[in-house]
Amino acid sequence: MRIYELFVSALRSLWANKRRSILTMLGIIIGIAAVITILSLGDGVRVETLKSLQADSSGRQSSEINFNTESNYRLGSKISGFNDNDLNMVQNNRKVVKAEIESGYEGIINSSGIINGKNVMGNIYLTKKPNRKYLIAGRGISKNDLLANNPVALINKSLAKKGYVSPKNAINAGIELNGVSYTIVGVIEDEATLKEYQIYDIVVSKKFYMNNGADIPNNSMKLTFVNGTDVSKETKAIVQNLNKNGSQHSNGEYSFIDMGDMLKGASDAIKSITYFVVAIASISLFIAGIGVMNMMYISVSERTQEIGIRMAVGATQRQILWQFLIEAIILTLTGGMIGYLSGIGIAKIISAFLPFKAIITFSTFLLAFGTSTIIGLIFGILPAKTASNKNLIEILR
Amino acid sequence: MINLTSVNKSYRQGNGDYQVLYDINLKVKSGEFVAVMGPSGSGKSTLIDIIGFLDQDFEGSYIFNETVVSDLNRRDHAKLRNRSVGFVFQNFKLINNQNVGENVGLPLLYAGVKRHDIHVRVNKVLDQVGLTDSYYKMPKNLSGGQQQRVAIARAIVAKPSFLVADEPTGALDSATSKEIIKLFKDLNQNGTTIILVTHDEKVASQARRLVKILDGRIQSDEEITNEDL
């Protein structure tokens, strides 16, 4: 018998029992639809999370490359990690929308200074606003100081002690930074931090500092990428290139904080949650499979006469087995495909009310296709065996 | 063509075996029209199931055209059934949710014939049994006689070596019976070997050889000479 004919006769007998076939299919449809909906939404959440982790608040994807000299915290290092050549090189990358060279981290730079004849080093916080944080003695930098370009500085307790024994003595004394003298107007705590992780020792007005010939090393480059770029991968490539060809590659190291690992962790977490929910939804598929088995058993016993007739005209056991097996598979596969489409539909409808889009991948199609076929096979084989093992003489009498 | 030598058959029933056929020796040549007659319970249906390749579970030897039937596996047995024999049953045994054409074409479907060729062949056979233009009718819309014609068409569609009919007129009125017997005779005159089981003497008398069975044993086997047609 031709395989095509097996399919035709299977379809015909399913059609002859439309209502029963559809009801049986319904179980598979619901099961597959649930799984596909969850997978699509899960994928949507995952991709959306990755995007938001990669992009800045305005939705752009960006990263930052830093240059560190070998003597990382040596004060007074005036080496700029990036120059115009580096900038051009980075901008040649087509994925890069914008590349900007910035100075230091968040307005903090390393510098050396002289306090009461002693060489000291410290992190200088270049402020643009009045500042009196962590103040323990004297006064803060006022608005007036900023407007009038007063050469005033705040130093921390340990610097004050080093230069003038006690914080009190340091007030109104001097400190030389970058060759310019500043008046110490206040003393701050030792543990002064900016944004909770960058420690600074000295606070001065940024405007004054810059105007007095201070050369702020350009040790940071901010990159903005075309949307949809694998930021981690592109940045890594640029950093590698800079370490080979960058203007200062022999004096230090270019590096960046790789968000990739962090993103992968988040992505894995969402994935495993999704799979867990899918596993629960799969229970309904199992139940649906038992429904298919039940229906096939009923079908086999109802069509005993037909099986006998087919055998009497020369159908082999194998042909009978395949006929019923194919019926079961057509049933589950059709259910699976309808379920797949409804799953997509449901996911789309749900995601219309959610801040992210459902994502339908080809692999979910394969999953629906494969699962429904396997369910048909597993739950169809026993009834089909029963059909093919029937005793011909007993059936016909 | 058909050669049965000391065939015995028994059913397991409860604790003991219940023997239905005792030492059957029967030869049928190509082109014969044999009637097997006997009262119900005589074992004639069992015999014909063995001859028609429906039942493989017997003792003794059955050689069909040099094929040892009892040595075949189930698959080859089914193939032999598909190609070499056409069965006609008392209650027609048609698949009710398939149309006449599909019922008739069933043996060809299992023989692997192309759909188009099946269609052509089925229409030809339907003409032969007097059911022209009935391809798309449903069996339930036909009379008993017509249904049996469909069954006969199905039996001869694959051009088998012989035809086996188990009480083919048992469910029909006498007028229709006559028509069906006439059809068998026509087929036989065109060269089809026919083995027919009946308990109706009128029907049996239309054959050319009569085998009588009683209690599982062949009682007589003789030519019928007083043909009145």
Image: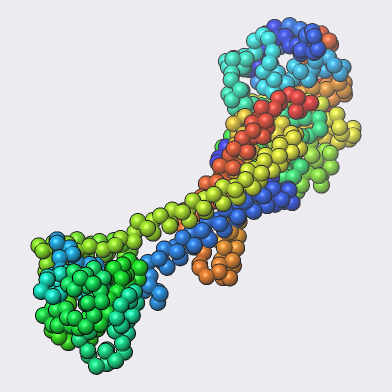
Residue A42 placement (x, y as % from top left): 51, 58
Rendered image coloring scheme: rainbow
Name the residue nearer the viewer: A389 or A41.
A41
Name the residue nearer the viewer: A371 or B146.
A371
**Eyeballing the image, is A388 above or below A271?**
above
Q: Residue at x 35, y 71 (%)?
A: A195
**Residue A51 falls left or right of residue B100:** left
Residue A265 placement (x, y as % from top left): 40, 55
| Residue A293 in view of the camera | yes
Q: Quadrant of residue A53?
A: bottom left
| Residue A330 in view of the camera | no
Q: Quadrant of the N terminus of chain A?
A: top right
Report the label total: 0
Q: Residue at x 23, y 72 (%)?
A: A166
Q: Residue at x 60, y 42 (%)?
A: A376
**Eyeballing the image, is A267 above or below B33?**
below
Name the residue furthest bottom: A148
Residue B215 placement (x, y as % from top left): 83, 10
Residue B88 placement (x, y as % from top left): 75, 30
Q: Residue at x 31, y 67 (%)?
A: A191
Q: Quadrant of residue B168?
A: top right
**Eyeballing the image, is A185 above or below B86?**
below
**Residue A116 falls left or right of residue A235:** left
Name the residue nearer the viewer: B72 or A33.
A33
Q: Quadrant of the C terminus of chain A?
A: top right
Name the residue nearer the viewer: B137 or A368.
A368
Q: Quadrant of residue B79?
A: top right
